[in-house]
Image (cartoon, rainbow, N blue to C red):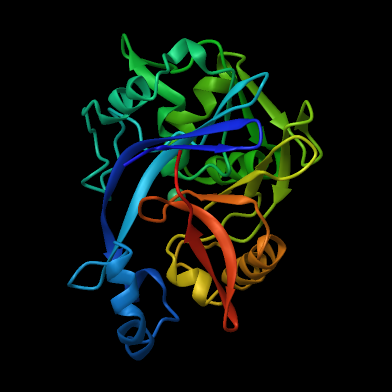
Amino acid sequence: MSLKFSVGDLTIHRIIEQETTFMPALEMLPELTGALLAENKPWMQKAGAIDDSDVLILCFQSYIVETPHHTILVDSCIGNDKPRPLRPKWNMKTDDSYMRALAAAGFSLNDIDFVMCTHLHVDHVGWNTRLEGGRWVPTFPNARYLFGKHEFDYWTEQNGKAPVPPFVDSVLPVVEANKAEIVRNDYAIGDHVRILPTPGHTPGHIAFTFGRGKDDAVMSGDLMHTPLQTYYPELSAKFDIDPAQAATTRRSFLERYCDTDTLCCTAHFPSPSAGKIRRRGNGFSCEAVAAG
Ligand SMILES: [Zn+2]
């Protein structure tokens, strides 16, 4: 399986940390009915998006985008050595899959110029930091880390009420190391990288669009988690902080890119995870394209 896409003057690499069963579909999508699931199970199974027991299969990955000027890592996955007691597959893990995937794609930690997070949930900030001599240090020593201001402010406030572990171990150490930039939604890097506000999953969730003057690719983060939500954009995930806003954002995002050439790189769809948005009935589908 190729993990690389070329669009416009960009090269995009998938850096996979895990691709695995995650949560029963009926639990993850509270509005999903058994009947609708049964109707859609055949194509979902064929797509590798659900297993025999109706558990959704998700991919956990970063994307690295090479523009003519920069090497940018989007969403830093799960990370190692982090206490995540509610998620056995993530808790205090020590495997080398992420580092091996990074090396296999031809990158060293020093190569990353920017790390950008669509939002600050636990599976999108993990490798922002790694444990070194008992301290959390930025994993990518040469990178500026970009955090959306609305999202950063929201989690600062939550963390003030009760500690939010991924914020404490994977975001604040980057700020303390003076590697963070808190950016507004009009922030851009040259003429290749822009922010698209996509609130709902979290209040400050953002997508990133890449391409000179046009969106050759978009990183959609967690505005959707499984291909079933492209068919039925009204199905919000139990993790969406504002489910109604998430559903509105999902439909308008899918409508925006429907029948365009933009490569939509999802955070969690099963491999190949990226595709082009096409209309399907009252909803949409994400159609795989040949990687190359
Ligand atoms: Zn996620």
Q: Residue 46 at what x, y percent from top left?
A: 29, 68
Among the 4 quarters of the image, the one containing residue 181? top right
Any part of residue 163 in sight: no
Closer-to-camera residue (163/38): 38
Closer-to-camera residue (172/286): 286
Q: In the figure, is residue 214 to the left or right of 271?
A: right
168, above or below 176, in the image = below
Any part of residue 100 in sight: yes
Image point 80% across, 39% down: which residue? 213
Q: Which quadrant, please, contains the N terminus?
A: top left
138, above or below 78, in the image = above
Q: Residue 88 at what x, y percent from top left?
A: 21, 46
Farthest-out residue, bottom: 35
Q: In the figure, is residue 57 to the left or right of 205?
A: left
137, above or below 229, in the image = above
Farthest-out residue, left: 52
Image point 28% across, 24% down: which residue? 100
Among the 4 quarters of the image, the one containing residue 160? top right
Q: In the figure, is residue 281 to the left or right of 61?
A: right
